[in-house]
Image (spheres, helix red, strand yellow):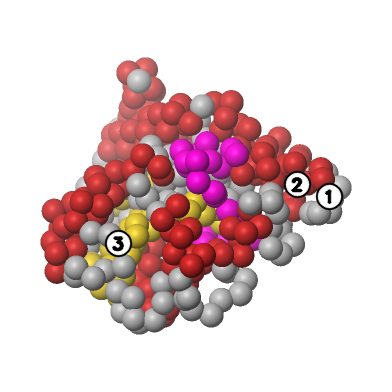
Amino acid sequence: MKKRLFTPGPTPVPENVMLRMAAPIIHHRNPEFMEILERVHQDLQYLFRTTQPVVVMTCSGTGGMEAAISSLFTRGDKVITVNGGKFGERWGELARIFTGNCVEEKVAWGSAITTERMVELLKEHPGAMGVCITHSETSTGTASDVKALCAAIHEHSDALILVDGITAIGAHEFRFDDWGADICITGSQKGLMMPPGLALVAISERAQDVINNRKGLPQYYLSLKKALKSHAGNDTPFTPAVSLIIGLDEALQMVRAEGIENVWKRHEQLAEACRLGCQALGMELFSESPSYAVTAVWLPEGADWKQFNNTLKIENGITVAAGQDDFKGKIFRISHLGYYDELDMLTMLGGLERTFSMMGIPFEHGAGITAVQQAFLEA
Ligand SMILES: *Cc1c(COP(=O)(O)O)cnc(C)c1O
């Protein structure tokens, strides 16, 4: 059976990317590799819409988050974090461990923080040194309005803005320079159509100044100061994941060829089609502010998650992501992040229809795939 991956990380890897990574290994101080890294650095600036450095780190996305917190802040620094799901929660855990002074704002799962609430928080905590937000909260399929949040944070404070863009980069419009973010992180196995193993971290001028000049916490491997210093010479402080960086070069050429705005548009359309297809099968959407990277839906009424997931996976070859924490067994999540197209959404909805049939869940045959087709016709 053909296996199809619909999880929001790892995501499917295109064949041309896999082939590039299968070539014999080269040495990372070899001019051939440094040329590739230089191109990757430039293409990452294109991806993040920035003229500032975007460093490549050999670690998963969380390593990039830890690098940011531990490179920018020190003990006692007050950091505001927004927790609307597993990944917002992670910002809080990191801030607590490294600064010991975290103000965590809890938001109901499936909702995004409003700018009004953000402004209140900044007024309540005028000394906040940083604000950590999640652009696309993968655990709930929820997008927040990062552009508006950045504008509000700048208007009301001098706090550094740290954006977890791990499932937003390459799915949602994001403009690092124009919006005034200070840090934005993504990971290779999300919108970049790559295997796991790299974190990409964009760093503003203001953040670079803090990183380079403020005496902070003890650090070694995840130091952004070290990463920045090497970046300037198209180098890395330690042996990088050479094969992954070569694969990333290929993946970024694909993003360039399609055009970043077209990439965002495609994700918006895939997400819209996925939502309409799921609703046409009688399922309800989980998020009030749906992400373009991942769609979270409630399981059909009365369906047992284990049986549903087994039918989808074992009988139909489709892997989706389960709900987490309180929503385990209640919701599931469909990815359309990275290497997906219109026919993939038809396949996904077709797979759901087959699963419904096999489990005896009532639905209107063909309604899901018809809704997907209709969405693409209208787009
Ligand atoms: C996947 C993900 C992470 C964690 O990245 P890892 O690569 O698993 O360390 C963090 N934030 C968001 C929004 C994610 O989707």
Element marked by disc 3:
loop
Q: CA distance from mark 3 to mark 1?
A: 40 Å
The range drawn in magenta is 42-64
**Residue 206 among magenta residues:** no
**Which amino acid type is marked by label 3?**
Ala
Q: Is residue 91 above or below residue 23?
A: below
Q: Which residue is mark 3?
A: 159
**Relative horizontal placement of residue 325, taking residue 155 as reference (left or right):** right
Q: Report how many numbered discs are placed on residues in the image.
A: 3
Going 32% across and 18% down the picture, which residue do you hit?
Answer: 378
Q: What quarter of the picture does the N terminus occupy?
A: top right
Q: Nearer the viewer, residue 61 or 1?
A: 61
**Which amino acid type is marked by label 1?**
Asn
Q: Are marks 1 and 2 in contact (CB under 8 Å)?
A: yes
Label 2, ligand 1: CB separation under 8 Å: no
Neighbor class of circle 3 (other Cα within 10 Å; few <14, some 14-19, many 20+) is many
